[in-house]
Amino acid sequence: MSGSCGRIPPPFPDNEDQEAESDTRVLDSDEDDDDEGEDIFTGARSNPITPTSAPDEGDIFSEEGSYIRSDVHHATNGLHPDEEELDLFTEATVELTLTNTTSQGRREIIGPTASACNTTQVPNSILKPSIVTKTTEELEEEESGDQFELNIAVTNPEKIGDGMNAYMSYKVSTQTTLPMFLNKTFSVRRRFSDFLGLYEKISAKHSLLGCIIPPPPQKSVVGMTKVKVGKEDSSSAEFVEKRRAALERYLQRVVAHPSLLQDPDVREFLERDELPRAVNTQTLSGPGLLKMINRASDAVNKMTIKMNESDNWFESKLQEVENEEQLLRRLHAAVDSLVNHRKELCSNTAVFSKSVAMLGSVEENSALSRALSQLAEVEDKMEQLHQQQAFSDFFILAELLADYIRLLGAVRCCFEQRMKVWQRLQEAQSTLQKKREAEAKLLWANKPEKLQQAKDDINEWESKVSQYERDFERVTCTVRKEVLRFEKEKARDFKQHIVKYLESLLHTQHRLVKCWEAFLPEAKAIA
Amino acid sequence: MKKNVYSYSSCILETLPLRVQQSSFSSTFPGKRLGQAAWSSEGFGSHWVRSVSVDLNNDASLVIDIPDALCERDKVKFTVHTKTTLSSFQKPEFSVPRQHEEFIWLHDTIVETEEYAGLIIPPAPPKPDFEGPREKMHKLGEGESSMTKEEYAKMKQELEAEYLAVFKKTVQVHEVFLQRLSSHPIFRKDRNFQIFLEYDQDLSVRRKNAKEMFGGFFKNMVKSADEVLISGVKEVDEFFEQEKTFLLDYSSKIKDASAKAEKMTRSHKNVADDYNHISGALNSTAADNNTAFKKHLEKYAEVFEKLRKLEDRVASDQELKLTELLRYYTRDIQAAKDLLYRRARALADNENSNKALDKARLKGKDIAQAEENQKQCLQKFDKLSESGKKELTSFKARRVVAFRKNLIEMTELEIKHAKVRRLKCCVYHYMFTRQCSGSHGKPGNMREF
């Protein structure tokens, strides 16, 4: 199973059977496939989220991303050989066989059913090119004939430059079979402001249409300053890793959106070697300030507009979204607390381990002394396990929740856009009304020369009104569709992540068992 | 039954569900009573006892246990139950209520008895400390409005379990104290001990409180003086020299390890708590949701709830087997050190008496007295040394055995818990990756989906 919830691309089509196997391997303990073993149970070497696709030969998506991670947390290198991982399920005595998905690329974004099963295999960035038209589309997406795939990874953060002008550059690698791209595999280097620039461009174009635009990762002055200043400590490494993962998820969400993928800006972002520097993403620039002002006025508008909602669905949906955002915040706080406590547990365990070692060194009975030093070692290993688990807790759960809190914000924006469109329609309608009244007045006052003008005006505004009406219809339809798609994605995403979390726990427990089992004979040897 | 209790020893509510319910376990903390069933010597209590200090209660001629305890406000009333075949007692079987202060009184009188100077005196049981759960209960009460009913009920249940655990521990340490006395050939004959067991009236030791306070103060001063003494005195006996070095060093290390173990256990409990909050938050989110997502959320909440229980169990077991072991032996080491102090004092006395004798001989007066004094000091010192050696040697053996037992038990429990968690994760993992509409749990053809 691909380790990172879709961030790992399935291997190339010629490795199809390998990939298919890795699915069965999950529970079929007969598979003796060492390489595949690394995929799912790779926790030992690299965190499951890293885009490590072990069997690949120089695959751009392999180990690269994990180099940072080994600094961030002492990867338990060589703690356990891979073969042991396969025993995981034998020992747990769950034996099941199952047939695998037919084609690795097969992807429906239809229901939780399909998504659930394919969770383990398919990155959520696979999509169908057929969904382009908007107005005539049905709300349920249908299965289309050809399936294409597109996989993205963000890896290799590198610091360019020095001092306050330094920045991190990330490698964005794409692997695709879509015809609209020039190559099948390519990569470019991008910096954080490029990602923000992409968001600005997409937002400007698509938000008015009612699409839910995935929000980019947040800026962080503190984090970046530390990196710029050159502090080579674990917290800045952690920050870079966090950002790298967030950028990757961001891009994956963008390309998962069928209409966004078609956008030439997105394509350019992925393909073009040099992008013009996106300066208007800086907070204190002219456009930046303008954005802030716009946002303020939007907020005011939101309060004053009372939309005459003909369709209850929107009202109740918006309410739901707002509630959910609150609840997710609460959930996020709880997960945060878990991460912190586990880190605490980690350090306390380390301290305890040293203390036990000291005790062992003082103990006069030699067997007990040996056992105590062994215990100290076991506790040390536990510390590493806790560290890894905290890592998983954070990247699998906490970041997921943080992402969705922001995404729900984006959904709300989407609703607001629709309101804006409606408002525009209203204004046009009232303008039309005024023009008509003006015409009536002219008729009344009998001024034929101005009449023509008035009639032209009316025609103009009539066509505007009808266009805005169509726009509004279209936006309403799009928003509905988007929300449904979003909900399905959400359910699938959550499930993927919980599954991954369970895997990480499984790993930890398995290694725990091994640790303690190794210690038991030592304890028994005390005489 | 032994196995049953063993394996989930910490989670009483699960292993002894009926028993706890039988006892009048009221929902408010004051006035809790733990019934006989929950505390039978065959139950959990004795296992820990035997782990911590082996060979207790082997001798049927004097069997002591604490089958019952009542907690009221700050006071815990233990029911001390004795079964004996010894003729020195009036009845073959009897029970008396005792409070913590009376245990302390017994300990102090034994410490003050000259004859026992050469013995390791079992450490006094620490005062029952319900501060932790009480504080949490208080906080829970304050935060009641901000959480759902289910969450509140769950947290309350947890707190009660925690309270029960503290309660259990304090009963056990008191029990162990008495059992160490009863299994020691010399202590069991102590007159005060017999009074403690038999006298069914109030021992009225409370007037000693003021004296105790000062006594405690003096004791500490004396103790630090002792430390100086013990390091200053020139030791002639190799055995005691080694013991001194060893015990001093070991004492500080084990105290440190005990404190660190406590912190570690507390962190574990915090993690378990967090799982609880996550589960609660997931449930809230599910309650508010109307889509298919709702069912997923509820399932996830269930997963975290299970994780919490397992994590909790690990933490409790670790505490019981490791932390409690370290705590107990910290106290026991102190008792051994006290023996060394007493011997060192006797040695110092001996040397002083020698010097006094020489001075008397020089001066030519009070020689007989000085001689007598010197003889007594020497006798005392020799007796102390002899019995001290015996005691310290058996203490060594006792310690090693106890550590071995506890470490093995803890390891076995850790393995068991990890395996259970592993299995649960595996099952959930399977459920979630196969959970699709249609075929219910059938490991079927994925193509269907």
Image (tube, grey):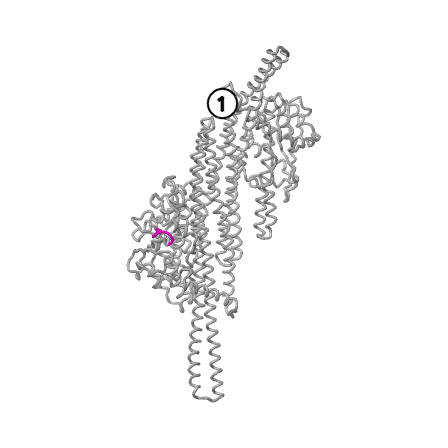
From the viewer's perspective, tell me whether residue A151 is left or right of residue B317: left
Estimate the x, y position of residue A360 in percent, counting from the top left: 46, 30
Estimate the x, y position of residue A227 in percent, counting from the top left: 39, 50
Estimate the x, y position of residue B159 in percent, counting from the top left: 58, 44
Can you say whether B236 is above or below B50 in the image?
A: above
- Disc 1 is attached to a residue of which chain? B
Magenta region: which residues? A158-164
Residue sitting at x 45%, y 37%: A379
Can you say whether A289 is above or below A496 in the image?
A: below
Instruction: Give the amino acid at mark 1.
Output: Gln
Residue wearing tag 1: B242
- As drawn, the residue found furthest toward the front would be B363
Q: In this view of the protein, which residue sits in the foreground, B117 or B210?
A: B210
Q: Is residue B280 a member of the stretch shown in magenta?
A: no
Estimate the x, y position of residue A131 in percent, counting from the top left: 37, 64
Q: Is residue B261 visible?
A: yes
Residue A258 occupies which quadrant of the picture? Answer: bottom left
- As drawn, the residue found furthest toward the left would be A183
Residue sitting at x 57%, y 28%: B224
- As drawn, the residue found furthest toward the top would be B364
Q: Residues within 10 Å of mark 1 (few under 14, many from 20)?
A: few
Can you say whether B362 is above or below A131 in the image?
A: above
| SS for callout 1 | helix
Can you say whether A112 is above or below B103 in the image?
A: below
Q: In this view of the protein, which residue sits in the foreground, A406 or B282?
A: A406
Q: In this view of the protein, which residue sits in the foreground, A169 or B363?
A: B363
